[in-house]
Image: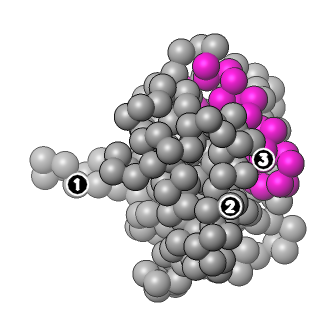
Amino acid sequence: MDTTLLLDAQGLHKAYKMHGKQLDILHDAALQVRPGETVAIIGRSGAGKSTLLHLLGGLDRVDQGEIQIEEVALSHASKRVKTRLRAARIGFIFQAYHLLPEMDIVENVMLPAMAVNRLSRAAMRERAIELLTKVGLAHRLTHRPQELSGGEQQRAAIARALINEPRLILADEPTGNLDAATGEGVLDLLFSLVNERQSSLVMVTHSPEIARRCQSVYLLQEGRLIKEEAL
């Protein structure tokens, strides 16, 4: 692998069986991401953008091809290694937030740090509160997800994704459930924090306007990733 790359995905193939037929999602797709780079992936609904993100994060397996994140080749990694990699080096931001309703916001943000267990519980809590303060939720620390607005929940999800200082952030339509103004604020915050920490960002979006905010843009079409010169 090129040592200047954080993520190197080559020759990706993925298909699913549905009603006895094979549905091809990815066909010889390739993507390279450098440290600190922001990348947008656009394409029509059903093109496979979310599937690709799940493959890049080790949440699903490719049928063929290779995905390497730094020194870890996902196709050769054990379930334990992939779980550790996701917890320590990858931050996920989902459209649906995926906050646990029985926990308050601080506890939700602490969860990835608890999985890695590098810090004491007191230090995890302190870091969670610091991040929640940065995303403008210092006044919501004892609240549960259902007591927050959609924009507040997404900001909490961003804080959760950043708690382990991941090298790579994977974001799946992070503003898809938000109104335009709230979504713009969430994106401003996300790009600011990514830039501050020099993390790499791969973001799936249906919006060319949002994609323009990234340094590189790829169109997912007929299973392949095509780099766009300009949007």
Query: How far apart are labels 1 and 2 at the CA level?
Result: 46 Å
Say whether residue 16 is visible. Answer: yes
Q: Residue furthest left?
A: 19
Mark 1 against mark 2, which lies toward the viewer? Answer: 2
Q: Are marks 1 and 2 in contact (CB under 8 Å)?
A: no
Query: How far apart are labels 2 and 3 at the CA level?
Result: 20 Å
Mark 1 sits on what residue?
Answer: 17
The image's mark for residue 6 is none
The disc labelled 2 sits on which kind of residue? Glu
Residue 221 counted in the magenta span: no
Residue 198 counted in the magenta span: yes
The image's mark for residue 194 is 3
Q: Which residues are magenta?
A: 182-206
Asked if residue 77 is positioned above or below residue 191 in the image, the reply reads: below
Query: How far apart are labels 3 and 1 at the CA level?
Result: 37 Å
- Mark 1: few/some/many CA within 10 Å (<14, 14-19, 20+): few
Asked if residue 141 is positioned above or below residue 13 in the image, the reply reads: above
Q: Residue at x 58, y 73 (%)?
A: 121
Mark 2 sits on what residue?
Answer: 126
Residue 223 at x, y = what percent?
49, 45
* Secondary structure under the numbered disc 3 in the rendered image: helix
Disc with the residue nearer the chain's start (2 vs 3): 2
Q: Are marks 2 and 3 in contact (CB under 8 Å)?
A: no
Q: Residue at x 53, y 72 (%)?
A: 114
Q: Horizontal placement of 119 versus 144: left or right?
A: right
The disc labelled 3 sits on which kind of residue? Val
Which sits in the foreground, 71 or 23?
Answer: 71
Residue 101 at x, y = what percent?
35, 46
Q: Residue at x 84, y 46 (%)?
A: 195
* Secondary structure under the numbered disc 2 in the rendered image: helix
